Amino acid sequence: MSKKNKFLHTILTMLILTSMLFISMAPPAKAHAAASVGFVILNSYSKTLEIGDEFYLAAFTSNGKKPVFTSSSSKVASVNTYGKITAKRAGTAKITAKIKNGEASCTISVKATKIQLSTNHISLENGYSAKLNATASTGHTVTFRSNKSSIATVDEQGVITAKKPGTAKITASADHAAASCTITVKKPTVSLSRTSASLYRTQTVRLTAKSSSKSTPKWKSNKKSVAVVDNNGTVTAVKNGTALITATVDGVSKSCEITVKKPVVTFEQSELTLTVGKKKTVKVSVSSGNKPVFSSSNTCIATVDEHGTVLAHEKGKAYIYAKEDGVKSRMRIIVK
């Protein structure tokens, strides 16, 4: 027999002997009256518990029968037919053991659970994580919840992951008690590898964006007719003009000005004389390095192919043009 059971057994034995002695010493009429008045004696008349705790309320009854146990608030503390009390939530409840013509009560005070957090505020860059530790005074499992999972999420272990700049609240709960930690996801710092670049048509340049965030930059050109950019930050010049290439990370943007230069197109000679049926390839210098597009002002007199080879057809005069990115140069052709 355990020490606790021995103690209860001793108390009950003493109470029984005392009761028998009291009844034996009383006059017959009074003894009959005492027997008609029941009473209940408890092993405790007040008890403070944590949520989840259990406690057995032992009751000695004058008639020797098992009492009926009831709780004034089973939401705070419940009791079963054997007097086992279970603390459920913070508050006060009265547990009553009742027999015919007699009863006794024990006041149960259930303490509110306290949640202890490792910190009340965490600042993170987007994409980074941090661990929030939380303990309940009862030792029960703590659950976590984010009020804005689009900004910061939290798993069942309290690991918080930043999703986008803003503020969210992470709440740790146990036993109807809660405590909160404010999460600030900071706007990132963003920088570009260069703020300006000059290109000729078809040329490319690779821009890189550095950010304190783990988010992938989003690239955009404000004039796709002048310059375009892909998802990796590679810019391709389309035609002469100016365009702004922007990298955006979590709402923070940085830009690079792209200037697509006009090329210089120059014929090696300004005039060429041919006889009918003869041909010659003209030389053209283009500063962009791109191949020019050739054309003739009068194909009856002279024609020119894509390589710049001029063929004389009949006597007369014509102009051969070389064009690149909107810039045109010409040379005179005389056919004799």
Image (spheres, rainbow, N blue to C red):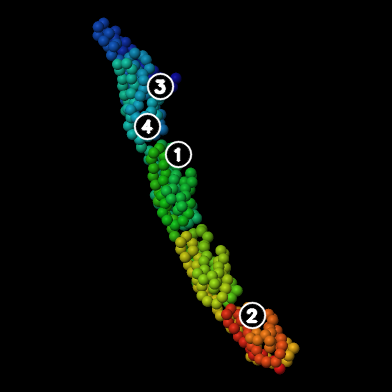
Q: Mark 1 points at which residue?
A: 141
Q: How far apart are marks 4 and 1 (CA)?
A: 20 Å
Q: In this view, does 104 lie above or below 306?
A: above
Q: Which amino acid does label 2 sit on?
A: Val
Q: How far apart are marks 2 and 4 (CA)?
A: 89 Å
Q: Is mark 3 on a helix, strand or loop?
A: loop
Residue 278 is left or right of residue 90, and the answer is right
- Sequence order check: which comes first, mark 3 or mark 1? 3
Mark in front: 2 vs 4: 2
- Image quadrant in which the C terminus is located: bottom right
Alpha-carbon neighbours of circle 3 within 10 Å: few (<14), some, or many (≥20)? Answer: some
Q: Which amino acid does label 1 sit on?
A: Thr
Q: Name the residue under label 3.
A: 82
Task: Locate residue 95, reporting x and y percent.
Answer: 34, 26
Q: Name the residue under label 2.
A: 293
Mark in front: 3 vs 2: 2
Residue extending furthest toward the right: 277
- In terms of depth relative to the viewer, which is nearer, 316 or 15? 316
